Every structure is written in C-alpha cells, then in structure tokens.
Amino acid sequence: MTYKTIIGLEIHVELSTKHKIFCNCPNEFGAEANTLVCPTCLGLPGSMPILNKEVLEYAIKAGIAFNGKISNLIKMDRKHYFYSDLPKGYQVSQAEVPFCDGGYLEIELESETKKINLERIHIEEDTGKQIHSEEEETLLDFNRSGVPLIEIVTKPEMNSAEEAKLFLDKLRATLKYIEVSNVKMEEGSLRCDVNINVVDSETGKKSIIAEIKNLNSFRAVVKAIEFEEKRHIDLLEADKNTEKETRRWDEAKGETILMRKKAGASDYRFVVEGAIPPVRISDEWIEEIKTTLPELPQDKKTRFMDSFGLSSYDAGVLTQSKDLSEFFEETLKYIDDSKLVSNWIMGDVLRRLNDDEIEIQESKLSPKALADLLLLVRDDKINNNTGKKVLKEIFDTGNSPEKIVKEKGLIQISDEGELKKIVEEVLNNNEQSIIDFKNGKDRALGFLVGQVMKASRGKANPQLVNKMLLEMMEER
C-alpha cells in the first residue's frame, strides 16, 4: 500500500508591539512574574478593552507580506473555554470574519516550487502562562495575558515533514524581515500546532485528523509529524481509527501523547465581543502600510541571483535572514567579489555563528573586517588556511585582520628565494618521498607540501610551493 500524508499548520505569532492588545501594559518578555498586568489583561470585572492600533498595523503588514486579502472590517469575537490561565473564561479572537483572508507562501523543493495556500490570518490575545513546579504545584504568570497574536492557518497542502519545515523557515524569515515579531520560539513568540492525517492512495480511506499542540521548535514539528505519520499508517493497516484528538509532543519519550478529544467550533460558543466596536480599515491606510514594507525574502533572493550571479541555493541561504543578507551586501561595498564573499559567509562564518548559537549582528565580525580579510586572502598576502585562523581571532577579539596578521607575523611567504631554501631542506630530508613521487605515487607530493607548510609555520604560498616542488624534483 502507498499512503499520502496531509498536513496543515496553525502558527501563533506574538507581535512585538510596545503595548498589549487591549491595554497599555508593556509587551515585554522576561519580566518578574505578574508585574506587567492590569485589570484589563487580568480580565477583572468592570475593565474595558481598547484595541491597540499598532496591533492592526503589524497584522496588516503580515497579511500583505503573505499575499492575503485584508478585510476592511475588523470585528472581534469571544471564544469561550475554561482554563486556569484564562481567568475571564473566554479569549478575544476572530471567528467568522478574519482580518485577512487567503494568502500563500511558496517553498522550493528539489524538483519544483510549491505554493502553500493559507486559509486565513486572524488576530487574538494570548493567555497567561502555567508554570509547573517540582512540588507538583501549578503557578500562573499573567504577564503574557493580553499579548497580541496573529494566528496563521494554512490549508492542508503539505505532504511531508520536510515541506512543513521549509514552510516554517520561509514564514519565520518573512516575519523577521517585516519586523512584526522576533519569532523566537524559545521565548514563545512563535508556536506551532500541526493537523495531520494520512490517506490510503489505493482505497482512498483516510485516518482521522489529529492535532499536535504547542510545538516549540522546528525540530519538534518534524519529529512529531514523522511519529504521527507512522502511527496513522499503523492504525489504517490494523483497520482501526480514533476520534478527533488533541495530542502533545513528549520530547523525552519521542512520541505524541493524548491530551483530550478535539473540540469543534460549536464547543467554543463564539459570540461577538460587545466591548470592542467594529473598526473600519480604509484602502488608503492599507496601501500606506504596504509602502513601508521592506524587500521580502523571495524578491531579495531573485535580485541576488540576477545582480550577483549567485545560484538559487546560495541566494536562498543568504536571504533566509534579513541581517545576514544585509551583512552580505554591506561587505560587497568594500570588496567587489560576490562569489568569494558568499562562499566565506556560507562556510566559515555561518559555521562559527551556529557553534556560538548567535546571530550575525551579535558577533564581533563587521562587514568591513570580513572584506579586509578576504582582500588579504585574494591578494595572496595570507593563504586560505591562515585566513580561517584570522577569522576565528576576529570572532574572539574583534581585532582587525591587519592587526592580527601583523602581531602574529602571518604574512604569506611568496618570496621565491626564501621559499627555495625551505623547499630544498624538505627535499633533502625526504629522499624517499621524491622516489615515491617519481614512481607514480601522487600522495607523496601532498606529503611534501605539508612538510613545507609545517616548516614555514603555515605561511608559505601553497601554489608557489607546488610549483617549486615539481620543478626541483624534476631536476633531481
């Protein structure tokens, strides 16, 4: 039998506005528990919510960036459910009329570009946060209560964990480009729910949809999808099925765990939020907001390919992060060599950033420092391996490449007279390697190059070393 996986995502994104959605409490992460609260975000009787205009502006930016149709009418609704982190017993959200209808993002697979359509994007408030102690107590922090969210709901058009990961990467990059969220999953700014089932391609029989809640990393999304794929296929092959379920991912066990039966729209008893009157959005304001949007990742990727001659892959890597793409372009102001710059950024620079778990703007490496380093390499002042050592030193100290090279005496030896003495000494000490090379053992040349580099403390010009070794061995 062959099976097709069907995946839809619901992504909750905290907007990085200055204040919460319905009050003037600061919208900040990391403050002492229950210090950023007021009667409105605590849901106390008699408090009155006032819709934050900045929330609408940020939400509209996202709707435009994701190619959706912005509604001219903003209407809020109450979504009723009872949970300890929601003291008023309902969440203010949008039901029938989302502020943004439709939209899409395109992801690039190996053989095609695939469009993933959106169902809707709507605005809502976040809830408080439960904190479970080792003493089996549940504590409540309401600093997050009332933080503005947009919920992005896709159509069930992804068919693998890989496609879901590509979609989330593209979505997160776009949100960061337009600066409406810091999209830090570790802070809860981006949370993802997965809806998944599988269908038997031969019989058309489908498993029943399961929802996996509050996945807090892309790795967890991938692992949960892969686990659920197998679980659903096993159910179908055993001729079993389940009711609609809400499940959670248990990282320690590497499996999803049943939480509860999945609620439907009728269970939430949606009603219009009477305390917040409808708001009309003019086409002029939408157009005005549109003009403030920066160049988006896909547009920038296309420009990088056209302007700098980069491959689709290279341009894609460099434009995944707005800061990284700007660092790349800034570096090119000091050195006109897009391929050399992209190779170093995608190689040693990104490797160091990943090792340190930091972003490019948090490092001590500046665009000018990288350009100056690459000029030293390109002009044969230092060799490639020395360049990598200098880059490490820049990351560690923030010193300029010129200062590091001067202080450590790293200038490459390209003087033939000086090199000839080193090469002669190496050949005199390695007669057997000369014999091996003349007998067709090419590895002997590499060994001799290594010996010269060692003798010169890595400063010899490798190309010149190769040339001189071949010439001098020929003479022997």
Image: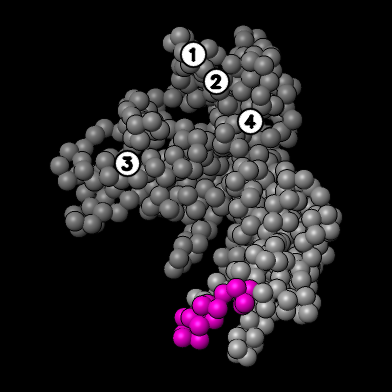
Residue 253 in the figure: left or right of residue 271: left
Q: Position of residue 77 (x, y in %)?
A: 55, 27
Which mark's residue is nearer the viewer, 2 or 4? Answer: 2
Q: Earlier in the sequence, mark 4 or mark 1?
A: 1
Q: Could you give the CA–CA distance between mark 3 and mark 1, rounded to whole angstroms?
A: 29 Å
Q: Position of residue 173 (x, y in %)?
A: 61, 50
Quadrant in the rendering for residue 148: top right
Indicate which disc residue 129 carries. Answer: 2
Residue corresponding to mark 4: 148
Residue 430 in the figure: left or right of residue 365: left
Identified at 79% across, 55% down, the residue is: 408
Residue 421 in the figure: left or right of residue 165: right
Q: Earlier in the sequence, mark 4 or mark 3?
A: 4
Label 3 Cα crowd, 10 Å radius (few <14 / some 14-19 / many 20+): many
The amino acid type of the residue labelled 1 equals Ser
The part of the chain drawn in magenta is 426-442
SS category of the residue bearing label 3: helix
Colour mapping used in the image? one colour
Identified at 67% across, 78% down, the residue is: 424
Residue corresponding to mark 1: 133
The amino acid type of the residue labelled 3 equals Glu
Q: Could you give the CA–CA distance between mark 2 and mark 1, rounded to whole angstroms?
A: 13 Å
Q: Reply yes or no: does residue 436 show up in magenta.
A: yes
Q: Earlier in the sequence, mark 3 or mark 1?
A: 1
Q: Could you give the CA–CA distance between mark 4 and mark 1, rounded to whole angstroms?
A: 27 Å
Q: Position of residue 453 (x, y in %)?
A: 65, 68
Identified at 53% across, 12% down, the residue is: 139
Which mark's residue is nearer the viewer, 3 or 1? Answer: 1
Q: Could you give the CA–CA distance between mark 2 and mark 4, rounded to whole angstroms?
A: 14 Å
Residue corresponding to mark 3: 228
